[in-house]
Each structure stands twice: as structure tokens, then as C-alpha cells.
Image (cartoon, rainbow, N blue to C red):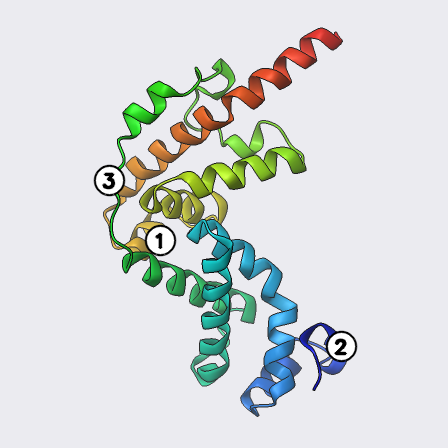
């Protein structure tokens, strides 16, 4: 049996050839779909779910849906965009089945370190403050710690780039509610990243 990682993507010379293979129900086509889009879709799933195991389940379910429902693909966008929507919907459906957890964000923020001045501006994204693998890993951990409602709003609006209207529609909430959730998520992320940014600022001052 051919392993997924042994599949050569050149089996299909381009996305159109892959699409035709999927429509012909060729088994290797679904594996190529996974290999081509899997890493990017997994990152989306893990950011939405906040848990690696659940993200794997979302990705698997979404890929099965995509292969089974390939006739629904109308070609108005790329396969990646279509799969992106399936992964998002699959993740949100799983999150809606979870029991809601009540979190007092104000209490959380008061217990955390003071937010540095550089992060006071609510229009500044935490991910834009300091680049590097270490910070990205910290942001991912901070995202995972957010309540589902805040994490999904932030990921869809600020990371995936959906408009306020689109993100609100995805979550089934009003645009004003979406803005509130994104704002609270930003505050929580800044508070979580404050110690790291304080240390980075201190190192920079010592070096000058």
C-alpha cells in the first residue's frame, strides 16, 4: 500500500488535473489533496480548536467531506479556498457541540502582568510586534488558552483575514459582538505576551 508521504504530487501536473482526478474518484487524488493542502489546513484547524488532537480530527473529517462532495465544487475559487471553508465549518460545528465554559476575562487580565505601552493600541496585532519562531509559538499557546468564542473570532478576523461581516456570519453572531470578542481576545493575548515583550525590550536597551 502506498503511504501518503510517498505520494508524488507530480502525479497531477496542476490543480485542474488534481480536480479531475478527484472527480474520477481516483484514490491517489485524495491523498494528493491531503499532501498539497494538509499542512496549511492543519494550522487553521489547530488555531480554531486550540488542541492538536482535535485539529487532526477536524482535518480528517474535512478531507473526507471534500473528497465525497467534490461534485459540489463549482470552481468559483481555488481548491484551497474551498477546502479552507470546509475546515472552518467543520471546526466551528465541533466547537458548538462543546459545553460552554464561562470565563471572567477581567479577572484574568488583572492577574496577569501589566501590558506594555507598545501593546496599548487596540489596532496593533500582537503577531506584528516581534517576529520569530519563539514568539509565534508563544502566540499559538496563548491562542489555545483563549475561550473558544474569543479564539475563533480572533483567528477568523485577524489571522484568516475575513471581514467583520464575514467572520460574524461564520460564527452566527452580530458584527458588534464579533468586534467585542476580537477586542477582548487582543487584550488577553497582549497580557499573555507582556512578560516576553518586556524581556525583549529590556534586552534591547541593554544592548544599546
The answer to whether residue 95 is above or below residue 157 is below
**Residue at x 41%, y 42% (from the top left corner):** 154
Q: Which residue carries the number 3 mark?
A: 102
Residue that appears at 50% across and 73% down: 63
Within-10-Å neighbours for mark 2: few <14, some 14–19, many 20+? few
**What whole-number distance in Å separates the C-alpha atoms at marks 3 and 1?**
25 Å
Q: Secondary structure at mark 2?
A: loop
Discs 2, 1 touching: Cβ within 8 Å: no
The residue depicted at 74 percent of the width and 82 percent of the height is: 11
Left or right: 130 with respect to 107?
A: right
Question: Marks 3 and 2: CB-CB under 8 Å?
Answer: no
* Image x and y of residue 165, in percent: 32, 50
Query: Between disc 3 and disc 2, whose residue precedes?
Result: 2
Q: Which residue is mark 1?
A: 166
Is residue 74 visible to us here? no
- 6 shown above or below 95: below
Q: Mark 3 or mark 1, which has the lower sequence index?
A: 3
**How far across and how far down the image is residue 124, in percent?**
48, 28
- Mark in the foreground, 2 or 1: 2
Asked which quadrant contains residue 18, the reply is bottom right
Quick check: 70 above or below 116? Answer: below
> Do the residues bearing badges 3 and 1 touch, measured as CB atoms within 8 Å?
no
Image coords of residue 185 (percent x, y)? 38, 35
**Crowdedness of circle 1 by 10 Å Cα count: few (<14), some, many (20+)?**
some
Residue 190 screen position, x and y as percent: 46, 26
Q: Secondary structure beneath disc 1?
A: helix
Which quarter of the rendered picture does the N terminus lie within? bottom right
Instruction: Name the residue tied to disc 2.
Output: 8
Q: Is residue 92 left or right of residue 74?
A: left
The front one of 70 and 57 is 57
Amino acid at each position: 500500500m502506498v503511504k501518503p508521504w510517498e505520494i508524488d504530487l507530480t502525479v497531477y501536473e496542476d490543480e485542474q488535473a488534481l480536480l479531475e482526478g478527484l472527480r474520477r474518484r481516483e484514490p491517489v487524488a485524495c491523498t494528493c489533496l491531503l499532501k498539497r493542502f494538509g499542512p496549511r489546513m492543519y494550522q487553521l484547524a489547530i488555531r480554531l480548536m486550540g488542541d492538536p488532537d482535535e485539529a487532526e480530527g477536524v482535518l480528517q473529517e474535512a478531507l473526507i467531506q471534500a473528497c465525497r462532495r467534490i461534485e459540489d465544487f463549482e470552481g468559483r475559487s481555488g481548491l484551497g479556498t474551498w477546502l479552507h471553508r470546509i475546515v472552518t465549518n467543520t471546526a466551528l460545528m465541533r466547537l458548538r457541540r462543546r459545553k460552554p465554559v464561562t470565563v471572567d476575562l477581567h479577572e484574568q487580565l488583572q492577574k496577569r502582568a501589566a501590558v506594555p505601552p507598545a501593546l496599548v493600541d487596540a489596532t496593533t496585532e500582537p503577531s506584528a510586534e516581534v517576529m520569530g519562531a519563539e514568539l509565534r509559538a508563544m502566540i499559538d499557546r496563548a491562542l489555545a488558552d483563549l475561550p473558544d468564542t474569543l479564539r475563533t473570532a480572533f483567528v477568523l478576523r485577524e489571522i484568516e483575514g475575513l471581514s467583520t461581516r464575514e467572520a460574524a456570519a461564520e460564527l452566527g453572531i452580530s458584527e458588534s459582538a464579533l468586534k467585542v470578542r476580537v477586542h477582548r481576545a487582543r487584550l488577553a493575548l497582549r497580557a499573555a505576551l507582556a512578560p516576553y515583550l518586556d524581556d525583549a525590550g529590556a534586552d534591547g536597551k541593554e544592548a544599546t
